[in-house]
Structures are given as C-alpha cells and as structure tokens.
Amino acid sequence: LPLKAILDELPGELHEIEALVEEAQSKVNSITENPEVLVRYEQRKEEIAQTKEELENLEGAKDAKRQQMNSMMTNWEQALTNCVEKVNVLFSQYMSELGCAGEVRLKKGG
C-alpha cells in the first residue's frame, strides 16, 4: 500500500517526526505570508475563470455554426439530389436511344 510505504519512510523517533512537522509548517507559513503569492494566485484564478467562460462561449458559437451549416447542407444536398435525379432520367433515356444503358448517381461521402 502506498500509505504504508510512506509511513515506513518516516523516522522512528518522536522528536525527528516533530522536526519534520515543524519544517513542513514553516514552508506552509512562508507561502501564506508572502502577499505576492496570494496576489498571483488570485490573478491566475481570475484568468482561469475568464478562460473557462470564453471557452464556453466559443463552444456555444461553434455549436450554433454547426447547426447552421447542417441546415444549409441539408437544403443544398436535397437540391443537388433532385438535380442528379433529373440528369439521370435524361441520361438514361439518351443512352437507351443509342442502344446502351447508363445512369448518373450522386456518391455521398461517409
């Protein structure tokens, strides 16, 4: 277990453990006593919040554009399909008059 490994690495004497605790506490205190660190932390926190908001806005705009594009594509694709069907009928008739067979199809991508 990871916790057991950590505990096994700790010194066996109480005064050694207390010294480690004091050292860790002084590191923590030095961080919180430095106002510049807190100011930078708050700035980064605000930047992250703004970036998240911008990302959400961009994702919303992307979704709206995707819906708009899909709507346009549906209309365009239907018009193209109708055109290809008409060309196919005329082409098939022409080929039939020549004693041949043929057709025109619209191949749609994956």
Image (cartoon, rainbow, N blue to C red):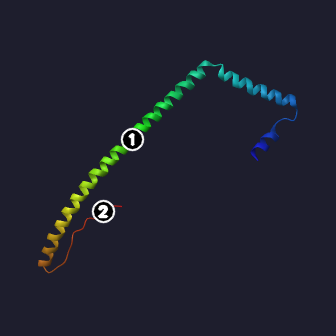
Q: Please give the name of the residue rendered at 76% of the width and 26% of the height, measured from the top-left corner.
A: 23
Is 73 placed above or below 42 here?
A: below
Q: Amino acid at mark 1?
A: Gly
Residue sitting farthest toward the left: 97
Depth check, mark 2 against mark 1: the one in front is 1
Q: Amino acid at mark 2?
A: Lys
- How many marks are shown on the rendered structure? 2
In the displayed structure, does residue 54 sit left or right of residue 23?
left
Q: Please give the name of the residue rendered at 18% of the width and 69% of the height, measured from the top-left corner.
A: 88
Question: Residue tagged by mark 2?
Answer: 108
Image quarter where the C terminus lies is bottom left
Is 103 placed above or below 32 here?
A: below
Compare residues 3 and 60 and report the one nearer the observer. Answer: 60
Compare residues 65 and 92 and report the one nearer the observer. Answer: 65
The percent coordinates of residue 101 (x first, y second) are: 19, 78
**Image quadrant of residue 6?**
top right
In the displayed structure, does residue 96 sit left or right of residue 48?
left
Q: Please give the name of the residue rendered at 76% of the width and 43% of the height, measured from the top-left corner.
A: 3
The percent coordinates of residue 63 (x first, y second) are: 37, 45
Which labelled disc corresponds to residue 60?
Answer: 1
